[in-house]
Every structure is written in structure tokens, then in C-alpha cells.
Image: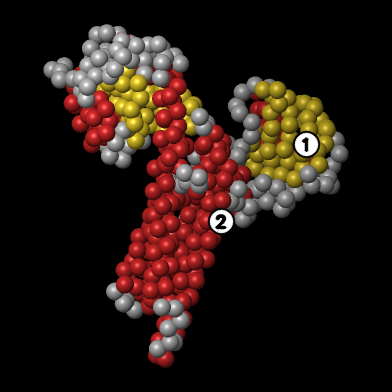
Amino acid sequence: MAETEKLTNNTADTICAISTPHGTGGIAVARICGPDALRLTDSIWKGCSLASAQSHSAHLGTILDSNGMPLDQGVATVFRAPRSYTGEDTVELSVHGSIWIQRELLTSLCNAGCRLAEPGEFTRRAFMNGRLDLTEAEAVADMIASSSRAAHRVAINHLRGGFSKRLDDLRDQLLQLASLVELELDFSEEEVEFASRTQLRQLATELHAELTRLCRSFRTGAAIKQGIPVAIIGATNAGKSSLLNALVGDQRAIVSDIHGTTRDIVEDSAEIGDYLFRFLDTAGLRHTEDTIEQIGIERSRDAARRARIIMLVCDSTALPDAQALEIASECSDAHIILVANKCDLTESAAPGLSDAAIRLGATQVKISAKTGSGIEQLRQLLVEAVDSETSSDAELLVTNARQAQALSDAADSTSRVINGLESGLSGDFIAQDIRQTIHALNEVSGTITTPDILQNIFTRFCIGK
Ligand SMILES: Nc1nc2c(ncn2[C@@H]2O[C@H](COP(=O)(O)OP(=O)(O)O)[C@@H](O)[C@H]2O)c(=O)[nH]1
Ligand SMILES: [Mg+2]
């Protein structure tokens, strides 16, 4: 891939980018990084010499445009290799945040010999220079994208090396397993057994359990990162759209007493507790000859299948809807909350609701979307549903499909190790599977990687990071 070659062969370049968001602001920060960062910045700078400045020092000076005329007064902060984010000489120039000044500054830097940075190129250099492993680099992108306390908490734990450390522990255990199997091989003719196969199997089983747990955590990890999908399903006129509006605090969906008002999915999100929830209000379930409404109902089923949480909304004054119960019962993976709505109209819920909740293993809550009664309790139930999945080790949730895939490969080869140990397979083959597991873990942390993988990861970053 030509693009990849271009990216991997250009570490000798000095690169520059605006790291602050595009637009006008009080201050904008340009980052200049690479072997010539100090000298090139000096050439557009009137003030003390940055090339002779100490690392981690800030200096006030005048920045010059491409014609050598004063462009702005600003602050240059110097970070010398290897004590910088990327591990290379870096200058951060803070200027006044006019779009025009930012553009002129980049032109001036490029005329002086810098090249514009690609998306994620600073972080890519940090990875290449061993400042971050791949899970930490990916956590940088997650930090920038985090939109809830929980997403931020997972990202910062990964960034501080929590996940990398767990991978190192797993790798150490695998190396121990490999060395025991290989020792057994070396001395096989003397019939020396350094570890019983039962012990080896126990070690492999523990590893497999941990790898499987990490793979499984991806569903929750991804949901926390992107917003937890919650499908609102139920019969027409049960009050689904009213509930969406009550939860997001806005008249987001049309509410009316005409059956079949909501036909397509209406989506909106709200932060509740530490989490971001993505609510999907769906077309009400009923028998209909209307083709468009039928398509809407099919979409409701789809939304339910993809959701982590299903809010099954029932009208407390009517019998529970059979189709809604059937859809909810098909989604065994999801957490189900049976919402008995319109409690303002009746003292007791319709018969059958509690039985239905028990059959579905659902939590039940009485609310009125109209008066707001019970909504706070429902919000609490939503948070508890996610809390129960994340338990105490939120820092070890996998949030990224690439990592989940490599961990699943590692779990597969570990289960081959277990089978091999159980069936008395020769140590050579077992050692081979152990090495494959280590290889898969090395892929997660980026010890082994290909230009394509790196390209894929870093091009999704912002420019300037
Ligand atoms: N009394 C009462 N009426 C409600 C409540 N929730 C919704 N409604 C009414 O029920 C009708 C249908 O509501 P809507 O939210 O459009 O239901 P959907 O078809 O399930 O989306 C509307 O006339 C709402 O005003 C509630 O808690 N109490
Ligand atoms: Mg509706």
C-alpha cells in the first residue's frame, strides 16, 4: 500500500499541525515535532533561541509569517527528546486563536521546512518510539471521544496501562506454561516430569477463563463507549414516545392518541448516572395491513435484538401485549425492564403484568410518563442494569473490536492447549499452540503489528494528536 509506505518511511520529517479544534478560540496551539523541530521553529521565531532552550521550558516571543513579518506574539514550550509525548523534539506554539493566524502559522512552518501531520501521526510516533503500546494509543483516541464518566473511566485506565499490565501478566503465565512444556520435551527421554499435566491443565484453564472474560467484556465495553442501546418497545399507544420524551427531557418524538403514530425509529441519548444511554423509540406493535407500518414493526424487532436493555412499555389499564412479550422473550441476552405506564389512571396494574415480568426475568416499575411519577426510579434501574454487568473491574473492559478479535484468537488457541493436555498430545504441538496464544496477545499490545493495522488505527485519530 503506497499510502502506508509513505507513512512508515517518513519519520525523519518534522511535522506540524494545529492541535486545538478547528475554529476561532481564545488560544490555538500548534505542535511541531521531529528531528528539526527546534531549528525550524527558531527560523520563524524572534525571541530566545529554542534550539538552546532547556526541555520543559516556556518562552514568550514573536512569530513571523512566511514573509518574515510579525504574525503574532505567542508562547513556545519546548520538550526535548526523549521527554516528550512522541519521544522526539517537540515545540508547542500557543498563538491567538484566529483562523487566519492559524492558517498563516502553518504556511510559515511549511515554508520553513515542516510537513503537515497526518491524522494521529503524533500518537503513531509515540507508539513507534515505544512511548505507548497499542492499547494505550487506542485509549488516547477513546479519551478524546469519551462522552460519559464511564467511557472516560475505561479510557483513562487503559491509558494508564491497566490493560497493558493485565496482558503482560497473561503473557508471563503463558511463558511459564511454555517453559514447563518445553522442559518436559527436552528431558522426555529421561521421563522426567517437571509439572504434572494436571497442573499444566489448571494453569491453561485459568488463562482460558480470563481470556474469555475479556472477550465477553467487549459487548459491554463497546456499549459504554458508544452509548448503551436501550430499545423502547410495546403496543401502540402504550406511551413509548411519551417515555422517550420524559427520559431525554425534550419533545423529541411525536406523541398522540392515534395508533401507529411512530413509524420509524426515533433515537436520542441522555446521560444518566455515569453512563450515556441511547434510547430507541420504536413503532408500536400491532397487527396492520399498512406496508410502511409493517416495515417499522420489523425495525422495532431489530432494535430489540441489538439492544443491551429493553424497556417493555405496557399500558397499566390494558392487558400486556402478546407480540411485545414474545419479542422481549426472544432477546435473552438483554436486560429487560417491564415499564407499567399510565399509573396515574389506575391504582393497580392490569392483571398479568407481574406474571409476565416473572416469566421474562424482568424488573418491573410503575410509572406515569405524563406526570413523571416513577421516572426517577426507572432511571435508577437503568443505571443498576449496567452496573451489574461491569462489576468492580470496569478498567478491564475491552472496548475495541481489534483487541476483542485478537483476544478471541488467544482464547481459541488456549482451548486447543487444554484439549491437547487432556488427550495426551505431544508437547511439541502443545508448545506450538501456546506460542500462538502469545502471538495473539502480542498483537493486542502491538508488539507484533503490520503497517495496515497501524494505518487503520491511526487514520481514525484527529489531526494534531
Ligand atoms: N394518562 C396518561 N396518558 C399517557 C401516559 N403516557 C402516554 N399517554 C397518552 O397515551 C397516548 C399515546 O402516547 P404515545 O407516547 O404516543 O404512545 P406510543 O404509541 O406508545 O408512542 C397519548 O395520548 C399520550 O398522551 C401516561 O402516563 N398517562
Ligand atoms: Mg410512539
Residue 429 in the image: x percent, y percent?
Answer: 35, 74
Q: Secondary structure at mark 1?
A: strand
Q: Can the viewer see residue 244?
A: yes
Locate the C terminus by quadrant. Answer: top right
Q: Can the viewer see residue 239?
A: no
Q: Residue at x 51, y 37 (%)?
A: 151
Asked if the residue at label 2 sits under 8 Å from ligand 2, the reply is no
Residue 141 in the image: x percent, y percent?
Answer: 54, 40
Q: Residue at x 34, y 31 (%)?
A: 363
Q: Residue at x 54, y 34 (%)?
A: 149
The image quadrant of residue 386 is top left
Mark 2 vs mark 1: in front: 2
Residue 25 in the image: x percent, y percent?
Answer: 67, 22
Amino acid found under the numbered disc labelled 2: Lys
Q: How is the image coloured?
A: secondary structure
Amino acid found under the numbered disc labelled 1: Ala
Residue tagged by mark 1? Answer: 76
Judged from this view, the residue extending furthest toward the right is: 48
Residue tagged by mark 2? Answer: 165
Q: Residue at x 68, y 34 (%)?
A: 30
Q: Is residue 456 left or right of residue 262?
A: right
Judged from this view, the residue extending furthest toward the bottom is: 190
Q: Secondary structure at mark 2?
A: helix
Q: Is residue 260 above or below residue 79?
A: above
Residue 447 in the image: x percent, y percent?
Answer: 53, 59
The image quadrant of residue 381 is top left
Judged from this view, the residue extending furthest toward the top is: 257
- Count up the numbered dots: 2
